Image (cartoon, rainbow, N blue to C red):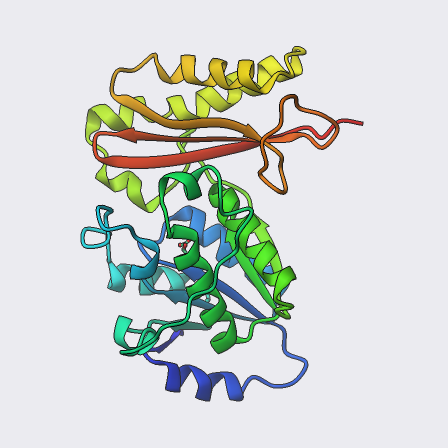
């Protein structure tokens, strides 16, 4: 039975009863749960004695022209999935409870947040770090699990935890894909049939670049061009970025060296924005 905690006060009361020595695992989400999320719940279950998830569509991480109002919120179905997965508790706060009137503090990571999604979604990662630190303070988990699908988000949160001495271990759960390679995302439900048919090209572009790298191409400009040329096979896809970056700092690199690289792509299909990534290397 998943206990649903609908405000901070009930969460705090629940947390106070978690006994010393019990390892608490936490999976923060925005709901619309799919198999990717459920694999994170399973990872948390492996790493902890007790598992709590949160569902909170965080307004702070959406830009003014983004999909906050239409973001899917199938809460009853989500609770059923958490029950079936044996998740012990769900924190399901309201916006008013999380951000009381007059809240004026934001948490900002200033390096890893800069490129890729940070460059095209100003303020997005500040919204993520603010809510995630609040959630960590409230839940006080020993371990928290985030999906590698949002590789930059993982890197930003790892930095924040390191820099602010937050006492939590961060685990990354691998990307879960459809049979045709499309990475699972809550936003896939927005895709028209035609856009859904074109969407696996994101993953194909990552694979093509990984192959080119394995065949000896290490120049990051050339690798990114190969990725873009695969996306160009469909007129429905409007690439936003296709980049090869340092896997940890996400800084720009001219060639892929011993540290390997993060291949990262963002593209629009209609009005739906999808992201995907793949880590290549490191060698030796
Ligand atoms: O990845 C998400 O679903 C969100 O960015 C997160 C981490 C739950 C913060 O709102």
Q: Nearer the viewer, residue 96 or 77?
A: 96
Q: Image check: 55 left or right of 132? A: left
Q: Is residue 85 above or below residue 3?
A: above
Q: Can residue 152 be seen in this view?
A: yes
Q: Is residue 85 visible?
A: no
Q: In which quarter of the image is the N terminus?
A: bottom left
Q: Which residue is drawn at 44% across and 34% down?
A: 276
Q: In this view, does 68 lie above or below 255?
A: below
Q: Image check: 59 left or right of 180? A: left
Q: In this view, does 271 lie above or below 9?
A: above
Q: Image check: 22 left or right of 189? A: right
Q: Image check: 184 left or right of 188? A: right
The x and y percentages for residue 281 are 68, 28
Q: Which residue is drawn at 41% across and 47% down?
A: 35
Displayed quadrant of residue 145: bottom right
The x and y percentages for residue 68 are 24, 53
Displayed quadrant of residue 11: bottom left
Q: Which residue is drawn at 50% across and 33% down?
A: 277
Q: Residue at x 63, y 42 (%)?
A: 248
Q: Whereabouts is ligand 1, in terms of quadrant?
A: bottom left
Q: Nearer the viewer, residue 105 or 141?
A: 105
Q: Quadrant of the C terminus?
A: top right
């Amino acid at each position: 039975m998943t206990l649903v905690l609908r405000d901070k006060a009930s969460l705090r009361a629940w947390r106070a009863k978690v006994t010393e020595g019990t390892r608490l695992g936490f999976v923060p989400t925005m709901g619309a749960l799919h198999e990717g999320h459920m694999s994170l719940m399973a990872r948390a279950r492996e790493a902890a004695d007790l598992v709590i998830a949160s569902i909170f569509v965080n307004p702070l991480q959406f830009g003014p022209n983004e999909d906050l109002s239409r973001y899917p919120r199938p809460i009853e179905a989500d609770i059923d999935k958490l029950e079936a997965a044996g998740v012990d508790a769900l924190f399901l706060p309201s916006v008013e409870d999380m951000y009381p009137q007059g809240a004026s503090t934001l948490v900002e990571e200033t390096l890893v947040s800069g490129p890729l999604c940070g460059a095209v979604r100003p303020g997005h990662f500040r919204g993520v770090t603010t809510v995630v630190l609040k959630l960590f303070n409230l839940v006080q988990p020993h371990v928290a699990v985030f999906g590698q699908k949002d590789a930059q988000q993982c890197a930003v949160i790892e930095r924040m935890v390191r820099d602010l001495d937050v006492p939590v271990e961060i685990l990354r759960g691998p990307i879960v894909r459809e049979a045709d390679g499309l990475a699972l995302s809550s936003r896939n439900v927005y895709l028209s049939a035609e856009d859904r048919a074109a969407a696996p090209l994101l993953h194909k572009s990552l694979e093509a670049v990984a192959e080119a790298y394995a065949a000896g191409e290490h120049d990051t400009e050339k690798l990114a061009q190969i990725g873009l040329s695969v996306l160009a096979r469909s007129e429905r896809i409007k690439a936003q970025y296709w980049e090869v970056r340092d896997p940890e700092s996400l800084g720009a690199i001219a060639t892929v060296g011993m540290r390997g690289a993060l291949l990262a792509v963002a593209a629009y299909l209609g009005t739906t924005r999808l992201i995907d990534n793949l880590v290549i290397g490191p060698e030796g």
